[in-house]
């Protein structure tokens, strides 16, 4: 199957922006192209401008480019089948929530705000022609040790980022997941109450 003609546009029930309907989370990354530094910077800039409670910006990003010791360390912290495809990404980004301030005050919305920042990063990257896949399957303590993070910083997600690669290079089971129909539960099941 040719990745170039694969149409993954969501069949939405209501109109949404094209960049949102077209965004998906592939596991096939180009193994040769380095990360486009301008596109990476734009994705991180979009994250920087995400909304946060009281403009606290409780997020940090550990950015590792393929071929570096940091990229290798993050790869080693990945769990399960993430290790079969994610190392091919041009960049691995650890999304980190600042759950306490320097003086020990809790930051109750840190995970929520970090999620918004990663969403902004994801949409900007997709807009610029990159693909993004977020993962929760990784050893958080290994990443903490690798990066020397203080306890108040919690690694929540690893983001694989790069150019779309050849789906045929993936193991067969992952190829099937990549080409399976995109689905979501109906909107009415997500809206608890509407008046």
Image: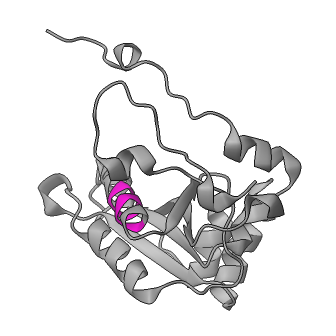
Residue 140: where, in percent of width, then height? Answer: 62, 61
> Can residue 22 be seen here?
yes
Residue shown at 64%/64% (left/top)? Answer: 141
Residue 153: where, in percent of width, then height? Answer: 44, 66
Tell whether 91 sits left or right of 114: right
Residue 132: where, in percent of width, then height? Answer: 52, 61
Q: Quadrant of residue 126?
A: bottom left
Image vertical order of residue 191 relative to residue 95, above or below? above
Question: What quarter of the picture does the C terminus occupy?
Answer: top left
Residue at the outermost right position = 172
Q: Quadrant of residue 5?
A: bottom right
Residue shown at 21%/67% (left/top)? Answer: 49
Tell whether 36 sits left or right of 90: left
> Can residue 153 be seen here?
no
Residue 14: where, in percent of width, then height? Answer: 30, 27
Tell me where the magenta segment starts and ends, as one range. Answer: 119-125
Q: Is residue 46 magenta?
A: no
Residue shown at 67%/52% (left/top)? Answer: 137
**Magenta region, main secondary structure:** helix
Image vertical order of residue 148 relative to residue 97, above or below? below
Q: Quadrant of residue 189?
A: top left
């Amino acid at each position: 199957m040719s990745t170039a003609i694969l149409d993954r546009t969501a069949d939405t029930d209501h109109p949404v922006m094209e960049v949102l309907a077209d965004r998906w989370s592939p596991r096939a990354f180009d193994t040769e192209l380095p990360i486009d530094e301008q596109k990476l910077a734009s994705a991180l800039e979009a994250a920087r401008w995400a909304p946060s409670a009281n403009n606290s910006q409780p997020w940090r990003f550990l950015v590792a480019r393929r071929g570096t010791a940091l990229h290798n360390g993050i790869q080693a912290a990945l769990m399960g089948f993430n290790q079969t495809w994610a190392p091919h990404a041009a960049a691995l980004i650890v999304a980190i929530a600042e759950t306490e301030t320097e003086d020990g005050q809790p930051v109750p919305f840190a995970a929520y705000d970090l999620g918004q920042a990663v969403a902004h990063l994801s949409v900007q990257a997709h807009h610029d022609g990159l693909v993004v896949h977020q993962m929760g399957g990784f050893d958080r303590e290994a990443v903490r040790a690798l990066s020397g993070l203080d306890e108040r910083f919690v690694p929540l997600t690893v983001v694989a980022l790069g150019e779309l690669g050849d789906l045929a290079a993936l193991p067969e089971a992952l190829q099937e997941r990549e080409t399976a129909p995109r689905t979501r539960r109906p909107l009415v099941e997500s809206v608890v109450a509407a008046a």
